Image (spheres, grey):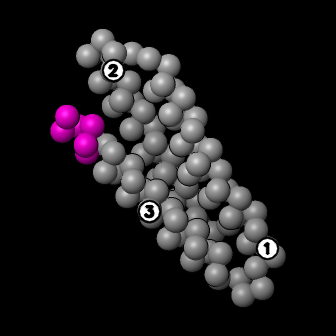
C-alpha cells in the first residue's frame, strides 16, 4: 500500500466522520433523531470503505502492478466527491 492510497483512505474516513457529525447534529437540532443515522454510516462503511480495502488486498496479484492502483484512486476520488456533495447539501439545508 502506497502512501497516497493510505491518504485516500484517511480522506474517505475523515469525510465520512464529518458527514456523520453534521447529520447527527442536524437530527438533534431538528429533534428527528433516529437510529437510521448510525445505520447509514455502517452501510456506507460496507459499501464504500470495504471495497477500497478489498482492492488493496488484490494488488499483489495484479500482473501489471498499476491497474488496481488506478482503479483504487478513481473509486476513492468518487467516494470523496460523494461525501463532499453530501456534506455541502446537509450544510445548506
Q: For the residue labelled by badge 1, is the local secondary structure a helix, a strand or a loop? A: helix
At a point 52% along the width and 65% down the height, the residue shown is 75
At a point 25% along the width and 43% down the height, the residue shown is 89
On the image, which quarter does residue 27 sit in?
Answer: top left
Task: Identify the mark at residue 78; answer none if there is no mark.
Answer: 3
Q: For the residue labelled by badge 3, is the local secondary structure a helix, a strand or a loop? A: helix
> Residue 7: x percent and y percent?
52, 59
Predominant SS along the magenta part: helix
Rendered view: 34 above or below 47:
above
Q: CA distance from mark 1 to mark 3?
A: 23 Å
Q: CA distance from mark 1 to mark 2?
A: 43 Å
Tag count = 3
Q: Is residue 67 left or right of residue 44?
A: right
- Give the residue furthest to the left: 92
Give the magenta range. Answer: 88-93
Question: Which residue is the site of mark 2?
Answer: 27
Question: Which residue is the site of mark 1?
Answer: 60
Rendered view: 62 above or below 30:
below
> Residue 72: x percent and y percent?
58, 68
Amino acid at each position: 500500500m502506497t502512501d497516497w492510497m493510505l491518504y485516500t483512505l484517511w480522506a474517505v474516513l475523515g469525510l465520512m466522520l464529518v458527514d456523520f457529525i453534521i447529520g447527527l447534529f442536524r437530527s438533534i437540532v431538528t429533534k428527528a433523531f433516529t437510529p437510521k443515522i448510525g445505520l447509514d454510516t455502517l452501510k456506507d462503511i460496507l459499501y464504500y470503505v470495504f471495497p477500497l480495502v478489498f482492492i488493496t488486498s488484490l494488488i499483489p496479484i495484479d500482473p501489471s502492478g498499476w491497474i488496481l492502483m488506478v482503479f483504487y484512486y478513481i473509486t476513492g476520488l468518487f467516494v470523496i466527491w460523494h461525501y463532499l456533495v453530501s456534506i455541502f447539501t446537509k450544510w445548506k439545508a
